[in-house]
Image (tube, rainbow, N blue to C red):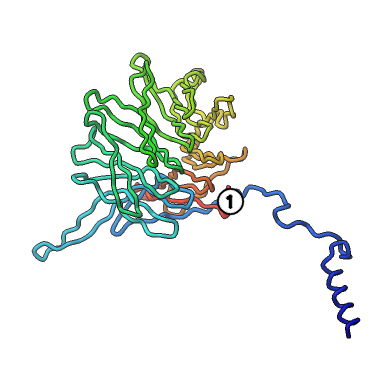
Amino acid sequence: MKRFALLIAVLLVGCNDPAQDPTGPKPAGPAAYPVFPFLGYTTSEVGLMAGGSFSTAAAINTAGTIVGQADHCSTFFLNGHPIQFCSTTAYYKPSGGAMTAIPLLPGHVISTATGVTDAGLVVGWSRPSGGFPIQAGWIFNPATHHLDSLPRINGGGVVFSAAAPNGWTTGTRYNGATLVPVAFRYSVVTNYLEDLLPAGYAGSQGLAIDAAGDVAGYVYTTTEGVNHGFVWYGGGPNQDLASLNSGVSVATGISGTVVGPFKPYDGVTPRVYSYTIGGSLGDIGAGINRYPTGLSDKGRLIGYGTTTTHTPFTFHNTVSVTLPGLTGLSLFTPTAVNRCGTIVGTGYDAGYRYHAVVWSQTVCD
């Protein structure tokens, strides 16, 4: 009996020994094979709020929380007569959750969300019925429902434009005395606030920001009367994109690399042009109208083309892909992309109302 048990043990050991496997050694597993990019996207609507007719999507974080603007309506009765009340406010929508309205600041009548961090903090702006230039830039914490606002310059308006995953944000503060727009860099984590108006320029606006605190946007001068794409690097130096001989330009996305539509001095067609301090990364829009709207920290570019039709696209790993549409909507415009490659944007319905949409892929970039 002992000999029989010993024979079984020897056989079992032999079966687990690759050297004894007559079929030869086994592969290490899926990780040993090259990973190829998945280029297929599916399109779906983000949704509408109760009683609403439109929605927009301005930003999405790594976890898939989407923020933007939507209208919503409710009905109440006055002396037995139904009265419908509608308002347009900012919203946030966690992945798999419902669209939830963000409260308005006291006295304000309209708001929109423009950025969301990976911690879930939402930034945006709102205004009272008086409008420009008294917008208020705010920060909202969905976990605590705390709503705070950014300091003003001489009572002027404040507009948040974007937020990076780690809490850096950017936008524009308007000087209430002179109405001069001034770009800013602000951390919702440390409360560090820095105005960005280089000497010699008449105004500036911040449009995009990355995790390093690099801000992309534009400046203008009173003498030329044109915009210069401009980059304020967190570690310096700053970069006026007019040095690229680009003419009128706006920097619309940044993740170390800067992208934006540029109108060359020697031509009339705006081009998608990527630029970094180390040199050009190439013009992927030569001869066609392609307007970039965002860039992820994995290098995925998004935008739309207008050569024949309004066509949404994404560009990653040297491959350009047309994003699919959705029945009942048209004129799709991507507005933001997260590090996984999930893209949000808007499309129009037959009544020319915005509908927030999301383009999803099954794997992360």
Picture coordinates of residue 97 (x, y %)? Answer: 40, 60
Q: At 34% from the left edge and 51% from the top edge, which residue is drawn?
A: 91
Picture coordinates of residue 139 (x, y %)? Answer: 33, 44
- As rendered, which of 213 and 311 lies closer to the eye? 213
Q: Quadrant of residue 59?
A: top left
Picture coordinates of residue 346 (x, y %)? Answer: 41, 46
- As rendered, which of 322 and 99 lies closer to the eye? 99
Picture coordinates of residue 11 (x, y %)? Answer: 87, 73
Which residue sits furthest right?
3
Q: Can the viewer see residue 280?
A: yes
Which residue sits furthest top?
223
Q: Residues within 10 Å of mark 1 (few under 14, many from 20)?
A: some
Image quadrant in which the N terminus is located:
bottom right
Kindly identify the amino acid type of the residue bearing the numbered disc 1: Gly
Q: At 37% from the left edge and 41% from the top edge, which residue is drawn?
A: 188
Left/right placement of residue 277 relative to residue 169 reads right
Which residue sits furthest front?
2
- As rendered, which of 13 and 270 lies closer to the eye? 13
Q: At 49% from the left edge and 49% from the top edge, which residue is drawn?
A: 62
Q: At 75% from the left edge and 56% from the top edge, which residue is drawn?
A: 28
Residue at mark 1: 40
Left/right placement of residue 341 relative to residue 205 reads right
Is 341 drawn above or below residue 214 in the view shown?
Answer: below
